[in-house]
Image: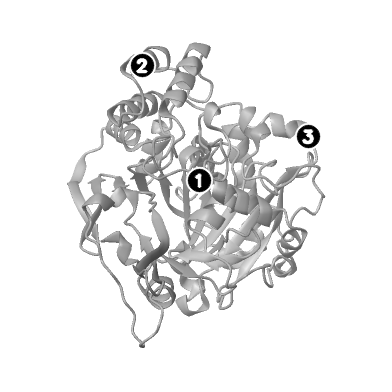
């Protein structure tokens, strides 16, 4: 999600508002309750369609999750989240898998609360863009085969103009755009408020993670990451350098595509977005989402399956006020048509970065260091090409007294890395006989430390509950210090962010 995000943001500097929707339309979009929603949801939700092109009948779908009532949502900024692909859904990934307050359980029918949701600090607006992605649609079928960065940015801009008319309480509020991967490309941060006092769309800053930024530097840094992490052979590394560097990542030459296919085979069945995390075992083939044509689709088939089940349920679509035109195809996490026929894609977003910085906007770039699709090295090369002066040199930042990543503050841009993004752990359980004569056997459950925390070097801790006669599995594991706790439905589990297995 790269170039379009910038083009889109760039448009915002020259905002001229038109079409208005009444407050009654806002009330029609209010979500009363989503199917499978857990108890205790204390924030308002809205979803629906905003028409962006009357002539072709294009309308984009959005989902707004406001800050909780006890966090004063009226004073919180508005953050627009855009996912990449191109052609992937922000509702599927940004909302239901990443930063949104409600995530989907493995049953594909119920939801659980995300304790790390960004809506604790901002009102979150998720947009499925362009038409043909998720619930967004066009009444002109040919539209789906002609999208590119420019057209996507234009429609996203039209969406915002009309959406702010429907939600006038957000006019003049601090507004930010964030996203990941190819969102760094097709949504240029609307510099709309340039020279405008008290602007309606009060664009303050732009944040993007593992972003597509500059094709040359992205290729150089990506191939270097693959090679230095032992994912590809020496010969393939040299072939990639020879055939790909200097070409378009969205429309690479055939020789480059061949080299990339060899690289993918050499990498094997890994999770490319978190190379030390064991991929989902639900399917034998691992689909990938991202900016590369050979990595289309959603990278995690486990969470993709949950989303595909949930967002295709009729009762869910009804609650979301979605699929009102009864689309001829099912809701999908990513559109192969939109992504596969993507047209224009600038070779570099560096000139846009420079304009955003010159406009005085806050720019924040972050990278997870286990992502091999748009890796840390690629982003560092691209930032280096901006030739920005350093205000604060490279330094570690901490979470609970442990290094969680590193950061460097430049004049106009802040770069942050997140270490060990993505985690997985092995589990064992069974019986150990303690008395053959009487046939006594004790049950155990072992949850090792996550793979990225070097479980082989961690201490072993035995947890025992009291009572006497109370279960350590019931209390210690499933209610207190264990990594997996039980949802209120009594059938599904959620991850405990404070689990002790991070340390032992």
Which residue, given by chain and number where applicable, does mark 3 sit on?
Answer: 141
**Residue appearing at x 35%, y 44% in the figure:** 367
| Whether residue 140 is situated above or below residue 451 in the rendered picture | above
Which residue, given by chain and number where applicable, does mark 2 sit on?
Answer: 241
Mark pair 2, 1: CA separation? 31 Å
Which residue, given by chain and number where applicable, does mark 1 sit on?
Answer: 280
**Residue appearing at x 42%, y 44% in the figure:** 278
Disc count in the image? 3
Say which of marks 2 and 3 sits in front: 2
Mark pair 2, 3: CA separation? 39 Å
Question: Who comes first in sequence, dot 2 or dot 3?
Answer: 3
| Whether residue 151 is situated above or below residue 80 in the rendered picture | above
Q: Quadrant of residue 330?
A: top right
x then y, percent, for residue 248: 48, 21
Can residue 17 be seen from the camera position used here? Answer: no
- Viewer-side residue, 411 vs 66: 66
In this image, 386 relative to 301: left or right? left
| Secondary structure of the residue carrying numbered label 2 | helix
- Viewer-side residue, 16 vs 372: 372
x then y, percent, for residue 251: 54, 21
Mark pair 1, 3: CA separation? 34 Å
| Secondary structure of the residue carrying numbered label 1 | loop
Say which of marks 2 and 1 sits in front: 1
Question: Who comes first in sequence, dot 1 or dot 3?
Answer: 3
């Amino acid at each position: 999600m790269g170039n379009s995000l910038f083009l889109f943001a760039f448009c915002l500097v020259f905002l001229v508002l038109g079409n208005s929707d009444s407050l009654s339309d806002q009330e029609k979009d209010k979500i009363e309750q989503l199917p499978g929603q857990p108890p205790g949801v204390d924030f308002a939700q809205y979803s629906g369609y905003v028409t962006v092109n009357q002539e072709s009948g294009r309308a984009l779908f959005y989902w707004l999750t406001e800050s909780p009532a006890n966090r004063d949502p009226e004073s919180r900024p508005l953050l627009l989240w855009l996912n990449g692909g191109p052609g992937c859904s922000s509702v599927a990934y940004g909302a239901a898998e990443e930063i949104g307050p409600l995530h989907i359980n493995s049953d594909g029918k119920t939801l659980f609360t995300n304790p790390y949701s960004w809506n604790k600090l901002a009102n979150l607006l998720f947009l499925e863009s362009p038409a043909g992605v998720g619930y967004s649609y066009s009444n002109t079928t040919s539209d789906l085969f002609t999208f590119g960065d420019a057209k996507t940015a234009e429609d996203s801009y039209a969406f915002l103009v009309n959406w702010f008319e429907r939600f006038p309480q957000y006019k003049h509020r601090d507004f930010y755009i964030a996203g990941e991967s190819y969102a760094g490309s097709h949504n240029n941060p609307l510099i709309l408020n340039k020279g405008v006092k008290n602007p309606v769309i009060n664009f303050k800053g732009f944040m993007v993670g593992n972003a597509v930024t500059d094709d040359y530097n992205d290729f150089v840094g990506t191939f270097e990451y693959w090679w230095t992490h032992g994912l590809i052979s020496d010969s393939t590394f040299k072939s990639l350098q020879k055939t790909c560097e200097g070409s378009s990542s969205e429309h690479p030459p055939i020789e480059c595509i061949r080299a990339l296919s060899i690289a993918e085979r050499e990498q094997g069945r890994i999770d490319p977005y978190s190379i030390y995390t064991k991929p989902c075992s639900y399917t034998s083939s691992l689909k990938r989402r991202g900016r590369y044509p050979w990595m289309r689709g959603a990278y995690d088939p486990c969470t993709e399956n949950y989303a595909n089940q949930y967002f295709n349920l009729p009762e869910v679509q009804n609650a979301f006020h979605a699929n009102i035109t009864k689309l001829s195809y099912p809701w999908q996490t990513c559109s192969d048509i939109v992504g596969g026929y993507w047209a224009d894609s600038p070779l570099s977003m560096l000139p846009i970065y420079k304009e955003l910085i010159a406009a005085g906007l806050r720019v924040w770039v972050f990278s997870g260091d286990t992502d091999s699709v748009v890796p840390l090295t690629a982003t560092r090369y691209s930032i280096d090409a901006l030739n920005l002066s350093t205000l604060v040199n490279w330094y570690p930042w901490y979470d609970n007294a442990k290094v969680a990543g590193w950061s460097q503050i430049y004049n106009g841009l802040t770069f942050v890395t997140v270490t060990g993004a993505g985690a997985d752990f092995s589990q064992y359980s069974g019986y150990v006989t303690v008395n053959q004569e009487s046939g006594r056997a004790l049950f155990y459950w072992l949850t090792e430390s996550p793979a990225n925390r070097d479980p082989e070097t961690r201490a072993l801790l035995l947890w025992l509950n009291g009572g006497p006669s109370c279960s350590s599995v019931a209390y210690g594991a499933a209610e207190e210090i264990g990594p997996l706790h039980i949802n209120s439905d009594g059938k599904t589990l959620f991850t405990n962010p404070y689990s002790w297995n991070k340390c032992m």
